[in-house]
Amino acid sequence: MNAALPARAARPFRKVLVANRGEIAVRVIRACRDLGIETVAVFSTVDRESLHVRLADAAVCVGPPAPAASYLHRQNLLAAASITGAEAVHPGYGFLAENADFADAVGRCGLTWIGPSPSAIRTLGDKRKARDAAITAEVPVLQGGPVSASLEETVALAEDTGYPLMLKAAAGGGGRGMREIRDRADLEAALDAAASEAQAAFGSGELLLERLVERPRHIEVQVFGDSFGRALQFGERDCSIQRRHQKLLEEAPAPSIGSELRGSLAEAALRLARQVGYSNAGTVEFLVDGDRFYFLEMNTRIQVEHPVTEAVTGVDLVKLQIVAAAGEPLGLPDGIETSGHAIECRINAEDPETFAPSPGTLRRFRPPAGPGVRVDSHGVEGGEMPPHYDSLLAKVVAFGEDRDEAISRMARALREFEVEGIRTTLPLMRRIVESRAFADAEVHTGFLDRLNQQ
C-alpha cells in the first residue's frame, strides 16, 4: 500500500469553510480535523441540528431550506467565510462544486478554492468542449456531435451516426436531458423536451447526439493533479450498476477486465488531465464495450464513490485535495499501488421499489461495523432527512483481500444496518449484493433491469 501523506510542519490552512451539507460535509470536516484545520459549517434553517453542524468548530446559517436561498446562495456562502475568517472553501460535490463562477468568486475574495481551476471546470463541465479536449488528447470518443438548431442538420447527423443514439445535455449530467433515440420519430419527439429539461437543470439547452452503446460497463478513473504540472491516476472504479443513469453501487478495482484494458483506461485518463493542465481531484468516466472504451465525461470534483479508491490505495483523497490546494506537491510515487477489493453501496432515503423520496425522522439508526466495514453518513438517531435535498443517507463500504471477501463483508454489513422511521434502499442493495449475477461480476448498465426480471 502507499505511504500516508508526509508529515508537515505547518497546517495547509488555519480554517476552511465547507460549502455543503450531509455526508460529504461530515467527510470534509473529518479530513480537516486530521490535518489540524478548524472548520466552518454552513447550514439552512432545517439543518440547524445536523451532524456536520455539530462536528464543525463554527457554523453559520446561510438561509431557509430551499437550496437556491441557502447552499446555492453564493453571496451568503462568501459572507460566512468572511465573517469567520476562513482561508479556503471546500465545495464537496453537488451544489456549487462544479460552478466555475463561484470558484472565481472565491478567488476574488482572497480565499483558496479547494478544487480544480475555474478554467478546467469550464472546459470539462461543457460536454462539447470536453469532447473536443478528449479528441485532442487522442482519447477515444463515440461517433456523434453537437445538435444543431436546424432539424434537418440534426437528422442528417443522426443518420450519419446511425441509430440507436443517445441524446444528452451538453452542460450537465445525472441523467437529466438524456433520451434514448431509436429512430427519426423518437428524435423529433425528444428534441424539444430534452432541451427544455437541460435548460431548466443547467441553464443551457444545448444537446449532444452520440451513438448509443447497448448495456456497456461504466468505468471511471480517479486522477489527481498538483500545481507543479504533475498528474497521477489512482486506478479505476466500476460504476455500472445504475438506475436511470444514477449510480447505486461502485467497486474498485473493476472486476473482469484485463491488464491491457486497465492500463489503456489509466493512460487515456492521464492524457486528458494533462491536456487541460488539470489540478486537484477529478474523475474521467468511460463507457466500456468489450475491449473498447469511449470517453463519457470528466467530473471536476471529489466523487461520491471516492471511498472505494481510498480503501484499495490507502490514500486519503480529501486530505490530498486540501494539501494540493495549498500549493504543496502530491508527495506520492508515480505508480500508485492498489491492494484488495472494495465495494460501496449507496443507501438512499427512498422507497426501494418506486424510488420515491422518503423524508422524515430517523427513529432508529444503527449502522454496521466490524472488520473491513466503513460507513460515511450524516445520519443520527432522532435526526431528520429533510425533503429539500439529495436523498443520500449513507455510504456503506466493504473492503476485503479479494472480491469474494468484500462481497461477504458487504452482505453482512447490509444485514446489520438498521433504519426505522423512513424507507430506504437497503432491501434493494441486499438483493443486488446477494445475487448470483453480481457474484459472477456480470455487471453492466442494464443490470438492475435484468435483476428485476428474475
Image: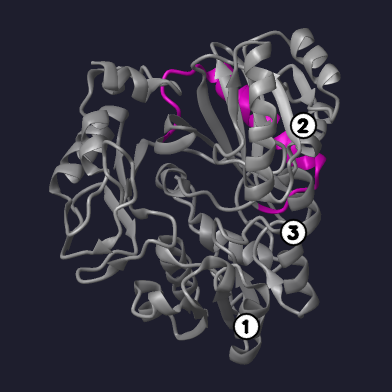
Contact (Cβ within 8 Å) of mark 3 with mark 2: no
Describe the element under mark 3 as helix, strand or loop: helix
Describe the element under mark 1 as helix, strand or loop: helix
* Residue 54 in sight in this render: yes
Q: CA distance from mark 3 to mark 2?
A: 18 Å
Q: Position of residue 360 (x, y in %)?
A: 26, 63
Residue annotated with mark 1: 81
Q: Is residue 89 left or right of residue 371?
A: right
Q: Amino acid at mark 2?
A: Arg
Describe the element under mark 2 as helix, strand or loop: helix
Nearest to N terminus: mark 3 or mark 2 = 3
Q: Is residue 288 left or right of residue 88?
A: left
Nearest to N terminus: mark 2 or mark 1 = 1
Q: Amino acid at mark 1?
A: Ala
The one of 275 and 385 positioned closer to us in this rendering? 385
Instruction: Indicate whether 446 appears above or below 403.
Output: above
The one of 262 and 361 positioned closer to us in this rendering? 361
Magenta-colored span: 251-280
Residue annotated with mark 3: 100
Contact (Cβ within 8 Å) of mark 2 with mark 1: no
* Residue 267 in sight in this render: no
10 Å neighbourhood of mark 1: few (<14), some, or many (≥20)?
many
The one of 125 and 412 positioned closer to us in this rendering? 125
10 Å neighbourhood of mark 2: few (<14), some, or many (≥20)?
many
Residue annotated with mark 2: 131
Which residue occupies 66% across, 55% down?
A: 98
- Magenta stretch encompasses residue 203: no
